[in-house]
Amino acid sequence: MEQISANKAFGGVQGVYKHASASTGTDMTFSVFVPPHDQGARLPVVWYLSGLTCTHANVTEKGEFRRKCAELGLILVAPDTSPRGEGVPDGPEGAYDFGLGAGFYVDATVAPFAEHYRMWSYVTAELPELVGVHFPVDLDRQGIMGHSMGGHGALTVALTCPERFRSVSAFAPIVAPSQVPWGIKALKGYLGPDRTAWRKHDAVALIEDGAFIAEILVDQGEADDFLAGQLRPDLLDKACRAAGIDLTLRLQPGYDHSYYFISTFMNAHLGWHGERLAGPRSR
């Protein structure tokens, strides 16, 4: 692992790192904020998955999370959204919603994407193992959050691995990719036309098929241009009601899809995670 940068912030260290990924077959870059802590302490960790066109840098530079993470003693890790580099295939020219920057947190099975687009394995297995070795994380206290495509990733990862995550939240997530244009394009392009293979990467479908987590926090801007056509929080609300999942869905008047929205409610989300990661896990 190579350290690209390290800057002191709120008594802790904001670092950016690069390593050769076995999952993607490429170099991958990610950021980690480690708050001030006592020597030898192991800290809870929150994983932040970013949205379409983003890298680790978007939330790192615009998320305004460090003060709250320092206050609560939370480590925050932000990976990239897709493999990158020489030989990594991209989507059609001009497409922002497929290919580079749009890995959708799946392991692709369709050529030519199957070789490198293995973001599910990367964020659920390889990166946590790497972070666990190099940073003072307590892997018994993990939360996960994300924005848009990353909200989709956070929800599907938490629903698939409920024993691992004590808390999950999302900003404007794509909750039912099998039913909206962004998701249909990505899932068909990475996983092929068989829609049964898509269900394990669709939060609403996972819940319909029996996946369960006790509670979810979602903030959604009412002025989000993608609300009705791509995001559909109403579908998540319906699925959670039927499954008995405690969904806190907050529609925020006037807010859009940008990091102005995310940074406004970041502290509330970190507080949500901090409360649930603070002590021993309830049985």
Image (cartoon, grey):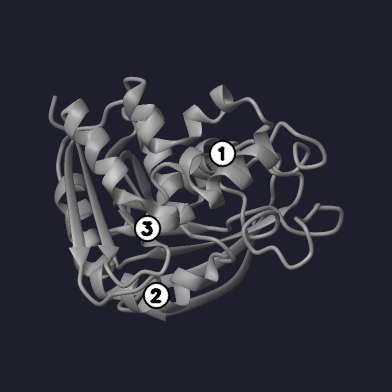
Q: Are marks 2 and 3 in contact (CB under 8 Å)?
A: no
Question: Amino acid under label 2?
Answer: Tyr
Task: Give the residue drawn at x 46%, y 78%.
Answer: 61
Sequence-wise, which precedes: disc 2 or disc 3? Answer: 3
How many residues crowd mark 2 within 10 Å: few (<14), some (14–19), many (20+)? some
| SS at mark 2 in the image | helix
Image location (x, y in percent) of residue 214: 19, 33
Real-space Cα separation, disc 3 to disc 1, in angstroms? 27 Å
Which-is-in-front pick, marks 3 and 1? 3
Find disc 1 in the rendering and name its residue. Answer: 120
Question: Amino acid under label 1?
Answer: Trp
Q: How many marks?
A: 3
Image location (x, y in percent) of residue 131: 49, 48
Quarter of image, res 187: top right
Question: Amino acid under label 3?
Answer: Ala
Find disc 3 in the rendering and name its residue. Answer: 228
